[in-house]
Image (spheres, rainbow, N blue to C red):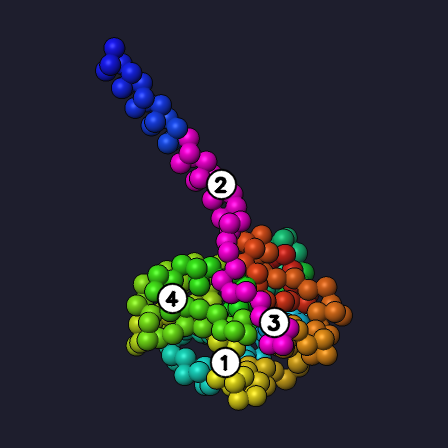
């Protein structure tokens, strides 16, 4: 009788544990970011809270932003290492999609889809979204990835151990492992320039004004005007990362 009670208790324990585990797995799969805490609290209104705006309708795909970023931040010159890059999306008449980004948009875009087959074609600049609930910040095991008081996501190379957790956690593909330093690297919104009162390099060189940045607390900033005058969207809003990179003219095909 004692063994039966013991076996019954074990079975109940295993059954309840399995149910609990199943609930956790299903819940995390359906809403993986639902329980995320803010990586950094929004500062008082007296401090800047930086965000970015990109007007897709103005981007001409010149690649000046990507070139300026590489030069300013000493980004590795080999292909496929970028803090900022440009993609071209071509939607065909049959609904299929072609995407290209030759050397991050630094090299010239060459349209390979016949003009008669094109429904719509446009350029999409990409960079770090500087999220308010940054997945990269939350998975870093040593605190090397963090948010500045102004809401800019940064990496402290002295603490980074090159584990790549943050690279895997970023849903926007905005991080890479520096091939020489073996530490995580990404867009800093040219934080070193901001601290000196200068604009980020990519914003200074944009010939059409497609890129806007500014303080969300400043009601008179160009960014605040941009957000007020346009119906903007963020990439992958369902992930609830608190993205602070806002696009005007963002098509649903963009990922």
The image shows residue 122 at horizontal and vertical percentages of 63, 68
Circle 3 crowding by C-alpha within 10 Å: few under 14, some 14–19, many from 20: few
Q: Which residue is mark 3?
A: 44
| Residue segment shown in magenta | 19-48
Q: Which residue is mark 1?
A: 191
- The label nearer to you, 3 versus 1, is 3
Q: CA distance from mark 2 to mark 4?
A: 27 Å
Residue occupying the far right of the picture: 229
Q: Are marks 3 and 1 in contact (CB under 8 Å)?
A: no
Q: CA distance from mark 1 to mark 4?
A: 18 Å
Q: Which residue is mark 2?
A: 27
Residue drawn at x 63%, y 53% as measured from the top left: 95
Circle 1 crowding by C-alpha within 10 Å: few under 14, some 14–19, many from 20: some
Q: CA distance from mark 3 to mark 2?
A: 34 Å
**Sequence-first tag of 1 and 4:** 4
Front-most of residues 57 and 175: 175
């Amino acid at each position: 009788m004692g063994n039966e009670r013991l076996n019954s208790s074990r079975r109940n324990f295993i059954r309840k544990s399995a149910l609990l585990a199943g609930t956790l797995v299903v819940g995390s799969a359906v809403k993986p970011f639902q329980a995320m805490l803010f990586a950094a609290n929004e500062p008082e209104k007296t401090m800047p809270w930086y965000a970015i705006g990109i007007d897709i309708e103005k981007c001409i795909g010149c690649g000046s932003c990507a070139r300026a970023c590489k030069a300013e931040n000493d980004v590795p010159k080999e292909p496929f290492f970028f803090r900022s890059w440009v993609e071209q999306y071509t939607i065909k008449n049959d609904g299929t999609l072609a995407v290209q980004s030759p050397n991050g948009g630094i090299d010239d875009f060459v349209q390979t889809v016949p003009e008669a087959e094109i429904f719509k074609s446009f350029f999409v600049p990409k960079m770090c979204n500087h999220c308010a609930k940054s997945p990269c910040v939350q998975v870093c095991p040593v605190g090397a990835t963090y948010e500045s008081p102004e809401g800019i996501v940064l990496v402290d190379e002295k603490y980074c151990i090159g584990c790549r957790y943050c690279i895997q956690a970023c849903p926007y593909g905005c991080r890479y492992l520096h091939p020489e330093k073996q530490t995580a690297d990404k867009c800093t919104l040219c934080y070193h320039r901001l601290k000196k009162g200068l604009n980020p390099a990519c914003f200074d060189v944009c010939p059409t004004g497609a890129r806007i940045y500014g303080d969300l607390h400043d009601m008179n900033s160009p960014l605040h005007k941009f957000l007020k005058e346009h119906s903007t969207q963020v990439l992958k809003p369902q992930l609830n990362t608190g993205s602070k990179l806002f696009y005007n003219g963002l098509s649903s095909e963009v990922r």
